[in-house]
Image: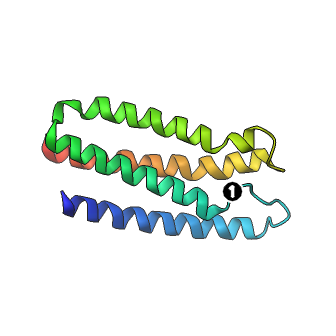
Amino acid sequence: MGKEIGIFTAKLIALAVLLFFLQSLYLSGEAQFPLYYSLSTIYAFHFLFVFSVFVILLYVKNTRPSYVLQFFIALTLIKIVASLLFLIPVFSGKSPNPGRDIIQFFLPYFIFLVAEISGVNKFLQKSA
């Protein structure tokens, strides 16, 4: 279990650093449009949720394998609700550029989601 977490964490860190760098480069040319949340806050949010979901599902797979799907669905719903709560200030008009904030949040959200599903899929295939 520890080896799987280590490998996934290393890949997730590499993905986060690469995406953060690319998104920072893109936004550096758009300095006149500040974001409500900093990129580091957005990436910390995504990283922590994806890492947590992976670790929880790996634990569930090793202790109660028949509940992995139910936990995956529940954790996905929790992540969606947390994302909406995170973005309440943007939705409530506190952001000067809500459209840009939403795009800058959800672009890495979906890329991290693909990484999460890929990582979970790999450890589920190993046990099948």
Tell how many labels: 1
Q: Where is residue 101 in the image (x, y as percent from the top left)?
A: 72, 50
Residue drawn where x is 72% and y is 65% of the image: 27
Q: In this view, does 12 lie to the left or right of 128?
A: right
Quarter of the image where the N terminus is located: bottom left
Quarter of the image for residue 81 reads top right
Classify 10 Å Cα crowding around label 1: few (below 14), some (14-19), many (20 and above).
some
Quarter of the image where the C terminus is located: top left
Q: In the displayed structure, would residue 97 be above or below residue 84?
A: below
Q: Which of 53 and 109 is in front in this view?
A: 53
Coloring basis for residues: rainbow
Amino acid carrying mark 1 in the image: Tyr
Residue drawn where x is 38% and y is 31% of the image: 74
Residue drawn where x is 60% and y is 64% of the image: 40
Quarter of the image for residue 73 reads top left
Residue drawn where x is 25% and y is 35% of the image: 68
Q: Mark 1 points at which residue?
A: 37
Q: Is residue 89 left or right of residue 63?
A: right
Q: Position of residue 65 (x, y in %)?
A: 17, 36
Element under disc 1: loop
Quarter of the image for residue 14 reads bottom left
Q: In the displayed structure, would residue 21 be above or below residue 102?
A: below
